[in-house]
């Protein structure tokens, strides 16, 4: 029995008609370029977060650069951070400035003034100052808890810059002072803020943000200003 070759073979269908079978040639080997295209088409696309890591945005690069400059400048300006620093001899004076912006002396002094005041107008100002100081403590604690930014080695928890800006605006708004005294109040707030960097307590951007926060908090105090009409129970408590 002789078999017909597959190449150009003829076959008959059930009706007796002949047809030519399809010619089958040898399969062409896959080229390297074809294999590369097929593997590339089958590969899954990169996740969006991986693409972002490979292609960082301009904002991310700018923020990273700003933080690097902030750390470098803060380290250079920390001239009173230790006894062996460049301005180590001025460290005691800077610590006196630091104490002047601490929250405890201001809270105790305001509370003592409330107890000793006989004027209803003075009690109103002091009571709102006490409210401002307590609001400052709460907001600074909340912001620090949310941000959790690593701080310099010599850091101690504080909100001096925020408090200095808040008290400065409060005093300038509600106390009648001569121009030289008003200038001294502003200088005190600036020196307290600068001392935070010089003592190595905070970075420059921390101090700048603290000043802005304190400035904004005074607006909250003004909006929620306490008076005998809005808080009669509090004023009744401090009345004699």
Image (cartoon, rainbow, N blue to C red):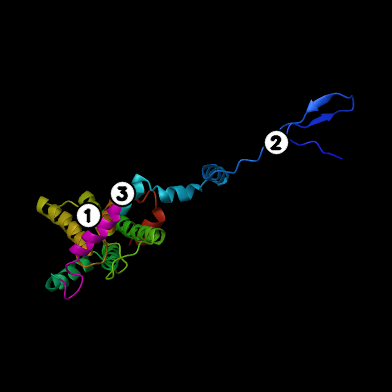
**Mark 1: secondary structure:** helix
Q: Residue at x 41, y 56 (%)?
A: 233
Whether residue 211 is visible to the viewer of this picture, yes or no, is: yes
Q: Which mark is residue 168?
A: 1
Whichever of labels 2 and 3 marks the residue nearer the N terminus, that label is 2
Badge 2 local density, few (<14 within 10 Å), some, or many (20+)? few
**Residue at horizontal 12%, vertical 73%?**
89
Helix, strand or loop status at disc 2: loop
- The magenta stretch is 65-85
- Measured as percent of width and height from the top left, residue 121 is found at 27, 53
Residue 77 counted in the magenta span: yes
Q: Quarter holding the N terminus?
A: top right
Instruction: Check disc 3 and report its element: helix, strand or loop.
Output: helix
Q: Which residue in the protein does label 3 denote?
A: 62
Separation of disc 2 and disc 3 at Cα?
A: 64 Å
| Label 1 environment density (alpha carbons within 10 Å; few <14, some 14–19, many ≥20) | many
Give the spatial CA distance, label 1 vs label 3: 33 Å
Q: Nearer the viewer, mark 2 or mark 3?
A: 2
Residue for badge 2:
24
Image side of residue 189 versus residue 137, left or right: left
Q: Residue at x 27, y 56 (%)?
A: 205
Image location (x, y in percent) of residue 187: 15, 56
């Amino acid at each position: 029995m002789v078999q017909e070759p597959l190449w150009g073979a003829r076959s008959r269908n059930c009706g007796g008609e002949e047809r030519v079978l399809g010619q089958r040639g040898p399969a062409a080997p896959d080229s390297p370029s074809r294999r590369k295209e097929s593997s590339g088409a089958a590969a899954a696309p990169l996740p969006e977060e991986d693409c972002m890591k490979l292609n960082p945005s301009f904002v991310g690069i700018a923020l990273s650069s700003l933080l690097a400059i902030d750390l470098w400048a803060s380290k250079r300006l920390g001239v009173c951070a230790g006894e062996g620093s460049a301005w180590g001899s001025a460290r005691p004076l800077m610590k006196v400035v630091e104490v002047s912006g601490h929250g405890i002396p201001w809270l105790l002094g305001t509370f003592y003034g409330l107890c000793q005041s006989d004027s209803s107008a003075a009690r109103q100002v002091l009571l709102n100052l006490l409210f401002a100081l307590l609001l400052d403590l709460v907001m600074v604690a909340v912001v620090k808890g949310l941000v959790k930014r690593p701080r310099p080695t010599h850091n101690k928890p504080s909100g001096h810059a925020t408090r200095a800006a808040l008290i400065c605006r409060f005093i300038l708004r509600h106390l009648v002072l001569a121009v030289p005294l008003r200038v001294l109040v502003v200088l005190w707030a600036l020196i307290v803020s600068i001392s935070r960097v010089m003592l190595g307590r905070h970075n420059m951007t921390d101090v700048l943000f603290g000043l802005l926060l304190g400035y904004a908090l005074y607006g909250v105090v003004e909006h929620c200003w306490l008076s005998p009409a809005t808080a009669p129970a509090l004023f009744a408590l401090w009345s004699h």
